[in-house]
Image (cartoon, grey):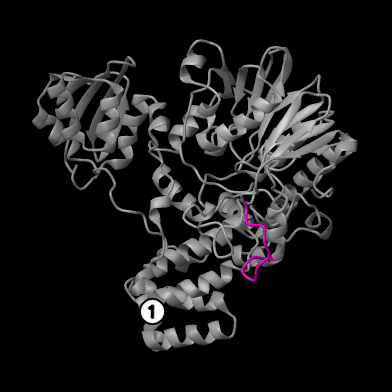
Amino acid sequence: MSEKYWLGSDDGITFTASGQNLAFTEYSDTVPTEMSDHSRTMNPGVFEIAGKNVYQIFGYALSAMTVVVGDDGVILIDPPEDVEKGRRMLEELRKITDKPIAAIVYSHWHTDHYAGVKAFASQEQVDAGQIQIIAHRDFMDNVIAGSVSGDGPILTARADYSLGTLLEVGPLGRVNGGLGPDFIMRTMSLIPPTVLVDDRLEHTVAGIRMTHFWAPSEAIDEIVTWFPDLGILQSAEVIQGESFPNLHTIRGSRYRDPQAWFRSIDKHLRPLPADFMIPSHGRPVAGREQVATVLRDYRDAISYVYDQTLRHMNKGLLPDDLVEKVALPAALAASEWLGDFYGGVPHSVREIYVGELGWFDADPTTLAPIHAVEASRRYLALMGGRDRVVEEAKSVAGQGDHQRSAELLRHVVRVDPADAEARRLKADALEQVGYRTPNSNWRNWYLTAARELDGTIDYSLAININAPDQIGALPAAALLEGLRFRIDPVKAEGATAAAGFVVTDTGETVGLTIRNGVVEPTTTIPTDTDFVAELPKLVVMGMLFEDFTAVLANALDGGSAKLTRGSLDDVTRFFGYFDPKATSRIHLSDR
């Protein structure tokens, strides 16, 4: 392992390798050298903080799990993204200790920090008080908003592109996960937290004193954990691995405020006398001076990009200009913790512009532009027609200008998404651009889009947002409220309707009222309901993810549900105002 990334056994950290690197580590003409070098830092194994009974199980997933062994139990921070990877980590954990798990900390709501939890705990153990689940107070709200009861479907489709889940590992596909060796989710699980962190929480578990600080940064509900008696800081994803931080994720997210991010570092991390720092991505850091340097450089990089972006925005520069103007100074660019492997300065400055000023670039021609497809149709005519543009795209590609080739072909594909030749040529151009970028998110998006265009994509590998265990952990009320985003205002035009649901096994009561093309959820049954159904949560799940009326009809026939008001015809009429279960794949590259 390279000492430029971590300090070795003389400084209190030892590494025991175990298993094969999941990233692609070879050198290839289709992989930038620095990207292969980055993969070679991701060998799986266990880091041990000597004399502290603290470990990091590293390289088995996108995230690395922190293990703290206490007097009579174990504290875990950030289970990986699926149960299968969690079980592999559990094998390494049991080589360390056979003590029972006493507490599990979710540092924030992203799946790679909790979805493997049931490799280590069961709902029954948590319900019995044997294991604490610790997270920020807004954790479940954020899980809900980022799943079926929010923008989960489009974010999940975009995640397949940015994380490369539809690509194979290799020189023509996914190389690494940027923050870890790989990211593939198989069996996802969720156990809701039982101990909630507000701004700060101090407590003792298994004889280990720890303090959790709320540190909004990469996620709005991020918490870091400080072990004062051990001198160890678990920095969660406030320090986002050995890469420039993802101030914006191209898969999509709400605005991540860079000022809040670096101020969290200043307020909660830098003042701590940490002898060791263990991030949730990336390897641990040893030595108080080294920890201080990483924290300082990280916050300086975020501040620099934000401050310089605003400096040039205040001079009237637009996003394209900002990308050319703002780059890390040499001293920060040389940091091994700020490489262009996951987050990146170019897409960060664009998001800062939008986050601070909004989408309007002050050019009034962009207030009500001609629709993109019609604009492309006119551009093709102006440039001499489809064939002329295709020939020019071939020509510039032959000269090595693959970005220009792809931009030209975008107009052709927009106008005629079935144009096989244009799709293939654009795919070829995107592949060549992708092969030259070390940023995993950019590379994955280029290559996935190319496969969608040329028809070689395998959608069976897509992330399943409706994983049963995930959905089963969400309140039935949240699932029903998600119908807000499925109401079809054309079908519901002029309609006023109401329904009531009593969820028999959870005790939840939910009302849904339709008017003006919106759905208002309530915690009481409306007085003028078309129907009221008493039903278990499992039937609610089936109705929402299969067929509204058919699932309820089967439950009524089987006796697990009943209507205390209204008829099945009323149910059919009510749910007729909504989009049915999605059956088609979201395509992102035909534009």
Residue 134, percent from left and from top: 59, 22
Q: Secondary structure at mark 1?
A: helix
Residue 46, percent from left and from top: 72, 36
Residue 462, percent from left and from top: 42, 50
Q: Nearer the viewer, residue 7 or 407?
A: 7
Residue 12, percent from left and from top: 86, 33
* Picture quarter with the C terminus: bottom left
Q: Taking 160 as reference, is 198 above or below it?
A: above
Q: Taking 349 as reference, is 380 above or below it?
A: below
Which image quadrant for residue 24?
bottom right
Instruction: Give the dominant element type of the magenta stretch: helix, strand or loop.
Output: loop
Which image quadrant for residue 255?
top right
338 left or right, relative to 75: right
Q: Amino acid at mark 1?
A: Glu
Q: Residue at x 54, y 77 (%)?
A: 404
Do we see residue 78 in this rendering? no
57 magenta-colored: no
Do we see residue 562 in this rendering? yes
- Which span of residues is magenta-colored? 23-32
Q: Residue at x 64, y 60 (%)?
A: 346
Q: Residue at x 77, y 23 (%)?
A: 53
Q: How many tags in the picture?
A: 1
Q: Residue extending furthest top?
A: 128
27 magenta-colored: yes
Kindly identify which residue carries mark 1.
421
445 left or right, relative to 455: right
Q: Taking 436 as reference, is 43 above or below it?
A: above
